[in-house]
Amino acid sequence: MSLDAEQVKKIAHLARIEINDADIPGYASTLSNILDLVDQMSAVNTDDVEPMAHPMDASQRLRADVVTETNQRDRFQSVAPKTEDGLYLVPQVIE
Amino acid sequence: MYHNKTLAELSAMLQAGEVSSVELTQYFLDRIKAKDSEINSFISVTEEQALAQAKAADERIAAGNAGALTGVPFAQKDIFCTEGVRSSCGSKMLDNFISPYDATVVSKFNTAGAVMLGKTNMDEFAMGSSNETSFYGAVKNPWDLKKVPGGSSGGSAAAVAARLAPAATGTDTGGSIRQPASLCNLTGLKPTYGRVSRYGMIAFASSLDQAGPMARTAQDCALLMNVMAGFDEKDSTSIEKEVPDYTAELNQPIKGLKIGLPKEFFGDGLDPEVAKPIQEAIALYKEMGAEIVDISLPNSALSVPVYYVVAPAECSSNLSRMDGVRFGHRCEEPKDLEDLYKRSRGEGFGEEVKRRILIGTYALSAGYYDAYYIKAQKLRRLISDDFKKAFEQVDVILGPTSPNVAFNMGEKSQDPVSMYLSDIYTIAVNLAGLPGMSVPAGFAHDMPVGLQLIGNYFEESRLLNVAHAYQQQTDWHDLCPPGFE
């Protein structure tokens, strides 16, 4: 399995990561090597095997739907790059 | 001097009033100042907080309500969020991140009265086996400064090996506690998945990540586990199970213990020089009355390919929270929202992290999900079932931790796949969720060799017992790297 430059660009877009054009061939080559390694998986038949998501097959624990956290907005926003009036600021999305 | 004492010895000295926590803390802080420039094992040294914690610990000891770790200095891997302290995870992305809260592991050490000396260096977001991917520069192996300490908990390993801290925390997603412990001559334990809380431990692959102790001896690891382990309702995969006193069974006799040797761990990929000390350890266990049983883990060769689907898939999802909006690195002058995301992430993440996010994104993308992620999860069950069958026959499984000793810096950093294969004996344990240890077992090519012990679910006490019994008969774990005596 090998990836070409266009595929790498598409994946980088899906992952929302900017990659310089000059670095694309390097990524294409190392990612293809990793997919070659991963392709060893196809050697084993797994038709009747149940996928395993948790080592002890535990399911997610649920809790009562009640408020457990206090409002700490100012504290959490103190580490934000840009805020105003308690809101996170990003470039304008809607004209 | 103090740096040559184990955690247990320092604890006893503190309780007996032979040294104060402030003296001990200042001693290690001075040693870090004098020596860390040689190995780059710390990202942040928290001198002021450490001395304040030490002072409080001395008061607790004087008041007679101290625990085993009260006043004992240690180092925290920089993957744990610590309130008011930079929590970088080895990444430029979080270089400016001062955590607004404590990880559960951090709270537990605080409650115990332990003194955090600082935050240790690590591979960026714990992705690496050599500690070369850190934004803060590579860590060097105290046994040979040209060689890597292993990773991702390489800063913790190097700091303890160089005697800059008596112990440290680590995290292990595919071998990140055991492999650096092996390469730096330390004792390290990766507990059963769910035994130690993941809350506030910056997530890499959530179904595999597990925190554990790194120290000189199994006894010290037991003391640390007594603080670290336990149910936490803030971690949705934390296991509700009583925590034993991990020191209680250290001295149990191991006569009659059944030790399994998986033939797959002694095959072609293993350096014959590394195999020698492992064989000597097996002979010693036999002398001590253990029964050696040949076993097989037939699907273990698939663990590396399976891991490089499961771990990147989960990391691509976990790291999507680093978007330049709520915390962490943000690019200058974004022209629109997409530009903000793409450039913040492109600038903030290093090459290996990007590579893994891309692989994970691809594996989870439309049309590929079944072929990669579901297939990997099915194989994960087969790998796990191999261990289940093995533990019907044996009590513990033994083998090498790593196929080779520490390699040269730069040797594998251009070839990710060869780097990944250095974790071939450790990854299957994470996929199965089992506890595993690495124990110093001798030297090959003048570098440390680690013995891996794998236990059944929640059998950390047994592993610590088996390691402790070995350490009563050997002194490999006492050896200190030249230049750091």
Image (cartoon, coloured by chain):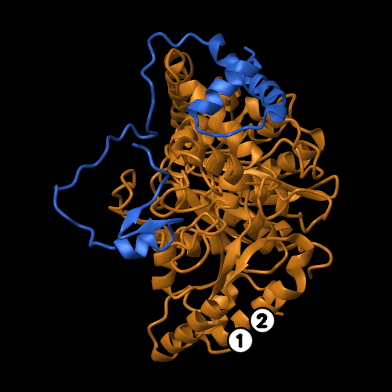
Chain colours: A blue, B orange
Question: Crowding near pointer 2: few (<14 within 10 Å), some, many (20+)?
Answer: some
Q: Residue at x 36, y 18 (%)?
A: A50
Q: Secondary structure at mark 1?
A: helix
Q: Amino acid at mark 1?
A: Glu
B45, A87: nearer the viewer: A87
Whole-percent x, y for residue B452 in the image? 62, 42
Looking at the image, is B336 positioned above or below residue B124?
above
Q: In the depicted view, which residue is nearer to us: A23 or B58?
A: A23
Q: Is residue B325 left or right of residue B295?
A: left
Q: Quadrant of residue B303?
A: top right
Quarter of the picture containing the N terminus of chain B is: bottom right
Tag 2: residue type? Answer: Tyr
Counting from the top left corner in percent of width and height, residue B407 is at 79, 42
Residue B83 location, quadrant: bottom left
**Same-chain check, marks 1 and 2:** yes
Above or below — where is B16 with respect to A49?
below
Residue B251 position, x and y percent, is: 52, 60
Q: Residues within 10 Å of mark 1 (few under 14, many from 20)?
A: some
Q: CA distance from mark 1 to mark 2?
A: 6 Å
Q: Is residue B34 above or below residue B208?
A: below
Chain under callout 1: B
Task: Find the residue positioned furthest to the front.
Answer: A95
Which of the two residues, B10 or A53, is positioned nearer the viewer here?
A53
Q: Chain of mark 2?
A: B
Q: Is residue B248 visible?
A: no
Q: Secondary structure at mark 2?
A: helix
* Labels 1 & 2 near each other (Cβ < 8 A): yes
Q: Which mark is residue B194?
A: none
Q: Quadrant of the C terminus of chain B?
A: bottom right
Res. B23 mark: 1
Question: Which residue does the numbered mark 2 point to in the structure image?
Answer: B27
